[in-house]
Image (cartoon, rainbow, N blue to C red):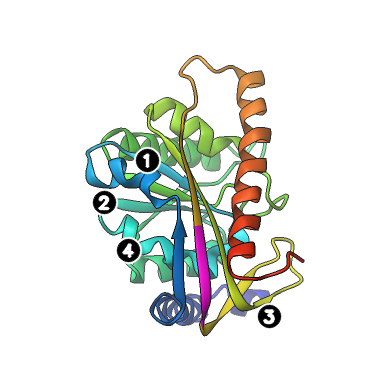
Amino acid sequence: MKKLLRSNAVQALLGWLLGLYIRVVLATVRWRHENLDCVEPVLAGEAGAVALFWHGRIPLCLATAPQWWRKRTKALISPSADGEFIAQALAMAGFPAIRISTAKPGDTAKARQAVTAFREAVTWVADGGALVVTPDGPRGPNEVIAAGSLQIARRSKQPVFLMGIAANPALQMDTWDRVMFARPFGRGAVVWEGPLYVPPDADEAAVSALIADWSARLSAATRRAEALVGRTPH
């Protein structure tokens, strides 16, 4: 079964279905944005940006598309099987992927690929592109930012924006990331926060402190979005 799910044909079908679903959600849900003005200077200017939202809100992520369509924007996606159909779905929506993952110790081939992808991401953001990232994916832990997105922001010297996303009514699955699927014609909210910066001289301890602080802020923005649509957190 796993081999079947990872076949090119099945991945293409899953990507098409997810791509169709997220476009339907964008078009039919009544989306409300809070603190959107914070990102306007970046959207209207030439600076790059790193934008973060939790992995479990991928099915709702096109709520932010009308904003990021205004810039050259890519998505940072794992090269895993699950990442493949997600990458295809986002490409359908106008967000091509940079594929990157953490290599296991001793896997020199994947380590080289990860370094190449990391450099591509840094260059993209430094040159004025936006990079959308689910910083707790693809394996978790849920709602804990991994260091990679902060390192991209530090190397590129560009701002980070947090995006808390929620919808109601919605189905929330019992998965590691508590993935949420909105029902069409409901209500949705995006809560924006930023710009945030990683100091160029930030050492490992400083990055760890930012991870804890920004993870809490992104979770708080997500809970705020849930409150705006009248949803009780599960």
Q: Nearer the viewer, mark 4 or mark 2?
A: 4
Q: Crowding near pointer 2: few (<14 within 10 Å), some, many (20+)?
A: many
Toward the viewer: 194 or 50? 194
Q: Vertically, is 83 above or below 158?
A: below
Callout 3–callout 2 Cβ contact below 8 Å = no
- Residue 26: image x %, image y %? 41, 74
Q: Earlier in the sequence, mark 3 or mark 1?
A: 3
Residue drawn where x is 48% and y is 77% of the image? 18
Q: Quadrant of residue 225?
A: bottom right
Give amino acid for label 2. Lys
Q: Which numbered tag is attached to residue 71?
A: 2
Residue drawn where x is 23% and y is 45% of the image? 44
Give amino acid for label 3. Met
Q: Which residues are magenta?
A: 186-190
Residue drawn where x is 36% and y is 63% of the image? 65
Give amino acid for label 4. Pro
Q: Crowding near pointer 4: few (<14 within 10 Å), some, many (20+)?
A: few
Reading the image, the residue beneath label 3 is 1
Query: Dot 2: what SS?
Result: loop
Give the alpha-carbon distance from disc 3 to disc 1, as whole Å: 39 Å
Give the alpha-carbon distance from disc 4 to disc 2, as whole Å: 10 Å
Give amino acid for label 1. Ala
Give the alpha-carbon distance from disc 4 to disc 1, as whole Å: 16 Å
Query: Dot 3: what SS?
Result: loop
Q: Vertically, is 169 above or below 218?
A: below
Reading the image, the residue beneath label 1 is 49
Q: Is residue 71 left or right of residue 33?
A: left
| Residue 69 shows up from this direction | yes
Callout 4–callout 2 Cβ contact below 8 Å = no
